[in-house]
Amino acid sequence: MQTIDLNSDLGESFGAWKMGDDDSMLAIVTSANIACGFHAGDPAGILRTLRKAAENRVCVGAHVGYRDLAGFGRRAMNTSSEELAGDVIYQISALQGLAKTAGTAVRYVKPHGALYNTIAVDERQADDVIAAIKAVDERLILMALAGSPLVARARAAGLQVVAEAFADRAYTPQSMLVPRQEKGAVLHDAREVGQRMLQLVQQGTVTAVDGSQVAVEAQSICLHGDNPAAVAMARAVRETLSNAGVQLRAFIS
């Protein structure tokens, strides 16, 4: 039976500012990338999300990012190796403490936003993040963009890597994500997105913006949770895959 993990970025509300519907998403996904307070999230809100994840038996990952609350972690930063490694260690460690309190544990790390995109191609920052993860716990899994050089680099350094695809993002003919600032980068048709992900699971390909079929080898699908249609789209993807006989489960038990 074909299997796939569904993940979403959660715990991103900050004080009075609500971001996404964590409770609904946690009833859909099998893994949760939970903000660690640097790009989004506050301690009380993160803890609530962790408790809900534990209640739903959803696998927990640390969603680490640049120290950039104002920019939601989507602004590229040329931080020093010492600063970047320290920031990543700090974020993982903070989430580990909150997770223990919530009755769960951090099992993997998924970088967020600009950090995610930068380390997919920037060897120096990639090595800084890899070293930081290993310094905390070599058993932690790195979630990375399918097809990016980071996947092989992290594996060569001794980390287990889970490659992910994005349900609501368009792909280039080179199997990379279309930059967010370009027209058509983000997809909004829930039915279309569901069928695209079924194709990914069954055939290992997605349709690129030019109509070509590109190979994408992924063990997890990201369902973004920070837009009004996120829950409906996530449900559509889950239902489409389940109805086709695909088993939805976390990549780690």
Image: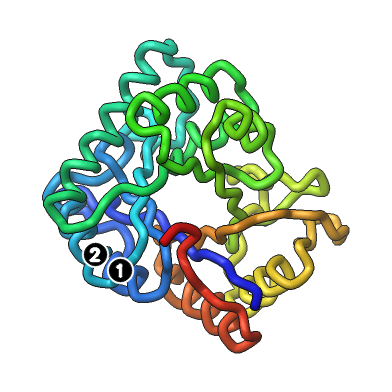
- For label 2, the crowd category at 10 Å Cα-Cα, with few meaning under 14, some 14 to 19 and many 20 or more, is some
In the picture provided, is 170 more to the left or to the right than 29? Answer: right
Q: Position of residue 116 (x, y in %)?
A: 51, 37
The disc placed on residue 220 is none
Q: Which residue is mark 1?
A: 57
Give the CA distance from mark 1 to mark 2. Answer: 5 Å
* Amino acid type shown at disc 2: Ala
- Above or below for 148 versus 51: above
Dividing the picture into quadrants, the one containing residue 10 is bottom left
Q: Amino acid at mark 1?
A: Arg
Q: Which residue occupies 42% across, 33% down?
A: 138
Q: In which quadrant of the rendered view does residue 2 lie?
A: bottom right
Whether label 1 touches label 2, CB < 8 Å = yes
**Residue for badge 2:** 54
User: Which residue is found at the position 49% from the left and 65% from the top?
Assistant: 6
Q: Quick check: 167 left or right of 47?
A: right
| Label 1 residue SS | loop
| Quarter placement of the C terminus | bottom left
Could you say where residue 230 lies in the image, as x and y percent from the top left?
Answer: 44, 68
**Picture quarter with the N terminus:** bottom right
* Residue at x 35%, y 15% (from the top left corner): 83
Q: Nearer the viewer, residue 253 or 51?
A: 253
Q: Nearer the viewer, residue 110 or 191?
A: 110
